[in-house]
Image: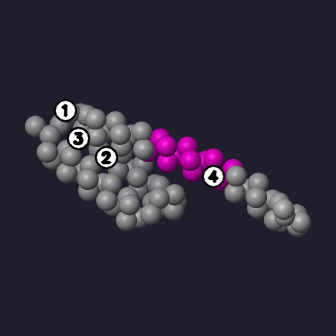
Amino acid sequence: MANHQSAKKRIRQAEAHNLHNKYYAKTARNAVKALRSTTDKEAASTLYPKVVSMIDKLAKRNIIHKNKASNLKASLALHIKGLA
């Protein structure tokens, strides 16, 4: 257990940041899932920029790795391209 005041504060801050990051990561995951389940190309094309923006924000804030963000965006673009 932490003995210093600064260490206790750091633990409290880490818990708050984890909760905050978990919310945004889960929201982005749900958006990706919604985009992947879309079968209409036009609807997917309008949803894609919003999802890409969410993914980029996660990567910028180091919630997910930048390569994972890039891979997600590429796979979503391929999905949209393959829609009829």
Say what secondary structure mark 3 lies in. helix
Single out the residue that lies furthest toward the front. Answer: 1
Marks 3 and 2, how far apart at CA: 8 Å
Q: Which residue is mark 3?
A: 45
Quadrant position of residue 9: bottom right
Q: Is residue 47 visible?
A: no
**Mark toward the viewer: 3 or 4:** 4
Q: Position of residue 49 (x, y in %)?
A: 31, 46
Residue name at image x 73 percent, y 56 percent: 13
Q: Position of residue 57 (x, y in %)?
A: 46, 55
Marks 4 and 2, how far apart at CA: 26 Å
Residue name at image x 33 percent, y 61 percent: 70
State left or right for residue 4 relative to residue 20.
right
Q: For residue 18, which numbered disc appears in the image? A: 4
State left or right for residue 53 relative to residue 74.
right
Q: Which residue is mark 1?
A: 40
Say what secondary structure mark 1 lies in. loop
Q: Is residue 30 visible?
A: yes
First of labels 3, 4 by sequence position? 4
Marks 3 and 4, how far apart at CA: 32 Å
Per the rendered image, the range of residues in magenta is: 16-28
Q: Residues within 10 Å of mark 2 (few under 14, many from 20)?
A: few
Single out the residue that lies furthest toward the left. Answer: 84
Q: Which residue is mark 2?
A: 49
Q: Is residue 78 above or below residue 66?
A: above
Give the amino acid at mark 2.
Answer: Pro
